[in-house]
Image: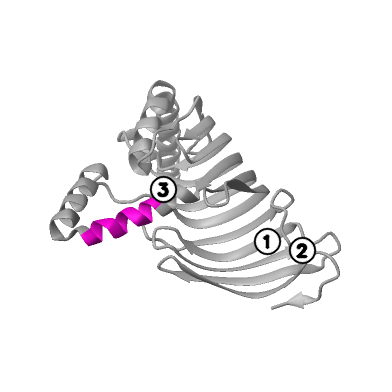
Amino acid sequence: MRLGHKIMLGVLGAAVILTAAVYVYLNQNGRRIFNEQASLMTNRKVSVEAIRAALPAAVELDGLKVEGLLSARRVRVDLDAWALLGGKVHVLSAEVDTPDLVIDQSAVSGADEGKSGAAVQGASGAASASASSAVARPSSAPIILGQLTIRYGTIRFHSAANKRDFILEKVEAVLHQVPLDEATPVKTDLFVTASLEKINAPFVGHFLKAKGWLNWAARGMDVSAQAIDDNGHVGMDALLKGAGNDLQVTGTMRLAGSQQPQA
């Protein structure tokens, strides 16, 4: 037998053994390790109802819940198999079916106010806040998803000021470079489509499409967005640029009814 064939057979055998080991490991420890590691990485309580292996090196999760943020019927997660055998979860990419994401505006505002208050308290207060933050956060490097695909999702923006929820339905999205915590400043490239039917927007069009990037931790973004009706007419065409929690929106929109396009 030629040396090349022996090497190929050896690599194939190692791959089969590794795959079998991953399957056995997941069946025995996968759910517990995932819940622990995911909770640590996101600083939130994370749980799944069931977890099972999928080829070549992935897991499928049923009943995913991230406390106060997200629930999803099914998630497929592509993993680093070597890290998994070492007792750690390293997520390469994920596909999420029918997720329900809640973004609480009042919680975000409260966090921003807390930051301002700490600055006013002086050096001792800032040092105390930094020490508390250091204790709360894991020492490991931040985990960033290479790609996140969302199918038929729902996003609920809760506004305490307006005492109502703004709901995006039928969300389809592909995002690249997604941090798994809220404190890592990373530019996330995105392409999103969604239904605006439950928002009752004042402009023409109930189909939304948007593309650009978002940096959640730094409160920055550069996104172009359009709202289109069933006939392909553009009711809203906007460019959203933000930095440091300041957002500038420019563009035009056609109000519902007989109004002309407005700046």
Number of residue marks: 3
Q: Position of residue 246 (x, y in %)?
A: 45, 69
Residue that appears at 61% across and 60% down: 191
Decide: marks 2, 1 in contact (CB < 8 A)? yes
Label 2 Cα crowd, 10 Å radius (few <14 / some 14-19 / many 20+): some
- Inspect this view and state whether residue 188 appears: yes
Tell me the quadrant of the picture where the C terminus can be found. bottom right
Q: Position of residue 67 (x, y in %)?
A: 45, 35
Instruction: Identify the element where label 2 is drawn.
Output: strand
Tell me the quadrant of the picture where the N terminus can be found. top left
The amino acid at mark 3 is Leu
Q: Earlier in the sequence, mark 3 or mark 1?
A: 3
- Inspect this view and state whether residue 183 appears: no
Residue identified by numbered label 2: 228
Boundaries of the magenta span? 110-120
Q: CA distance from mark 3 to mark 2?
A: 32 Å
> Which corner quadrant of the image does residue 9 belong to?
top left
Residue identified by numbered label 1: 209
Q: CA distance from mark 3 to mark 1?
A: 24 Å
The amino acid at mark 2 is Ile
Q: Position of residue 170 (x, y in %)?
A: 69, 47
Residue identified by numbered label 3: 180
Q: Earlier in the sequence, mark 3 or mark 2?
A: 3
Instruction: Identify the element where label 3 is drawn.
Output: loop
Decide: marks 3, 1 in contact (CB < 8 A)? no
The amino acid at mark 1 is Lys
Q: Look at the magenta stretch and give its main secondary structure.
A: helix
The colour scheme used here is: one colour
Residue that appears at 39% across and 63% down: 218
